[in-house]
């Protein structure tokens, strides 16, 4: 029985161990991204049943990401203190509660409770997941681990609209769809508990710990906040997720208004965007191992994505082509993911992995929290094209942040000239 509960990945370093850890962490991460979209795919249903508007619904997204952002920064300290595994188990339990709260919601208050529980559950996933990956996955496969981590997140985003809208239509009730959604984190929690030995992260006891990591000099817990690279990466996260917030929450209704596409078709645009992002992350996993000036690749890919979104905003395209172009724009943002995560790893001092990832990834939450009500108000104000032009602008600002990150990394790595005698 112990051999089942503690598979070979828990004890034997190597490819099999790495793949097991990558798969388990990826599955958990995909679940967290699925719950990012617990509510947005059914916004039109809430407008119909509860008499809400898009500005109010945008505030639900803000509530989710405010709680997630604050919790993410704090949970990094918790992960470094007690370990990633118990924190991950608690997070998945919050998702079960969030789906049940959504199923029982009778109005705006019930939806707020669901958003709050989902935000609380989402908060530890990046510091916990990246701590496990950095400690359990060997260096040759770490870039691909980051790639798979991003891919599973994109797939979680891609699955949510189809799952919730499809099950809701099939069952004739959106409440049934949410009851089924509660089974997703429950199943993942059971699997992670079964293979809990593979995702342990006790300091100093693992084959993939950095040499000397256990004996790293003690620093103040907030010393990492002095690193400029941390805040540059934070800004990069902010801009790319502001763009993503526009697509996830409002691309569907914006396309419906601009191009008269049915809502059932626009749900697949969001799914297509996430699938293209996943494809970009696959390519990004190879790019990160072969390219030195990563920010140039990131800038080119995101600039092309921004141009595609501006083309959709122009209204010049036929309806189906507009939806296709909007979906294909996801490739560029996906390509940037593994390179971004590798830069964060290099910036993290020994023993502060959870804190650094928690702080940097809270930029994701801030981007979603601030962007959602802005784009919701633009849509309510009769400006559906601004959903796409605004997301394009955010991507271009992300290009600037990426360039600054690359410049800072090269400046830090460059040897200083010897002082004249």
Image: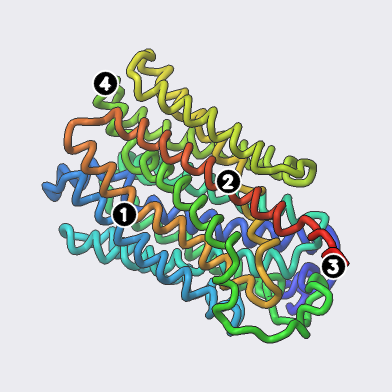
- Give the x, y percent position of residue 208: 80, 70
On the image, numbered disc 3 is attached to which residue?
Answer: 13
On the image, numbered disc 1 is attached to which residue?
Answer: 61
Q: Secondary structure at mark 1?
A: helix
Gap between marks 1 and 4 measured at Cα? 25 Å
Residue at left 42%, top 36%? 270
Position of 411 with respect to 314 (left or right) is right
Quadrant of the frame with the C terminus: bottom right
Gap between marks 3 and 1 measured at Cα? 41 Å
Q: Does residue 128 appear in the picture of this structure?
A: no
- In depth, the one of 140 and 153 nearer the eye is 140
Of circles 4 and 2, the one toward us is 2
Q: Are marks 4 and 3 in contact (CB under 8 Å)?
A: no
The numbered dot on residue 260 is 4
Gap between marks 2 and 3 measured at Cα? 34 Å
Give the mark nearest the N terminus, 4 or 3: 3
Of circles 3 and 1, the one toward us is 1
């Amino acid at each position: 029985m112990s051999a089942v509960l503690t598979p070979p990945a828990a004890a034997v370093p190597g490819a099999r161990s790495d793949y097991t850890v990558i798969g388990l962490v990826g599955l958990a991460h995909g679940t967290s991204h699925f719950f990012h979209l617990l509510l947005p795919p059914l916004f039109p249903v809430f407008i119909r049943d509860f008499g809400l508007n898009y500005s109010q619904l945008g505030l639900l997204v803000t509530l989710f990401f405010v709680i997630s952002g604050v919790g993410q920064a704090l949970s990094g300290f918790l992960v470094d203190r007690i370990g990633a595994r118990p924190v991950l188990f608690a997070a998945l339990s919050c998702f079960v509660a969030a789906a049940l709260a959504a199923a029982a919601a009778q109005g705006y208050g019930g939806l707020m409770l669901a958003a709050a529980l989902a935000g609380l559950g989402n908060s530890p996933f990046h510091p916990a997941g990246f701590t496990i990956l950095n400690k359990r996955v060997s260096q040759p496969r770490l870039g691909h681990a980051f790639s798979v981590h991003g891919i599973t997140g994109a797939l979680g985003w891609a699955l949510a609209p189809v799952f919730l809208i499809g099950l809701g239509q099939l069952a004739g009730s959106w409440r049934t769809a949410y009851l089924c959604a509660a089974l997703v984190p429950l199943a993942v929690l059971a699997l992670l508990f079964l293979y809990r030995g593979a995702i342990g992260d006790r300091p100093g006891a693992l084959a993939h710990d950095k040499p000397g990591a256990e004996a790293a000099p003690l620093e103040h817990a907030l010393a990492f906040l002095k690193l400029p690279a941390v805040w540059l990466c934070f800004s990069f996260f902010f801009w790319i997720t502001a763009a993503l917030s526009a697509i996830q929450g409002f691309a569907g209704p914006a396309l419906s208004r601009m191009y008269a596409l049915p809502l059932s078709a626009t749900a697949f645009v969001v799914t297509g965007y996430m699938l293209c992002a996943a494809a970009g992350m696959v390519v990004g996993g190879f790019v990160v191992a072969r390219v030195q000036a990563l920010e140039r690749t990131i800038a080119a890919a995101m600039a092309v994505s921004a141009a595609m979104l501006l083309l959709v905003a122009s209204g010049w395209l036929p309806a189906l082509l507009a939806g296709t172009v909007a979906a294909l724009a996801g490739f560029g943002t996906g390509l940037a993911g593994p390179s971004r995560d590798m830069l964060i790893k290099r910036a993290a001092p020994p023993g502060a992995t959870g804190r650094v990832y928690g702080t940097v990834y809270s930029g994701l939450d801030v981007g979603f929290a601030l962007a959602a009500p802005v784009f919701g108000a633009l849509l309510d104000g009769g400006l559906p094209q601004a959903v796409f032009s605004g997301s394009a602008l955010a991507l271009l600002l992300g290009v600037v942040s990426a360039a600054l990150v690359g410049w800072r990394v090269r400046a830090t790595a460059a040897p200083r000239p010897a002082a004249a005698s």
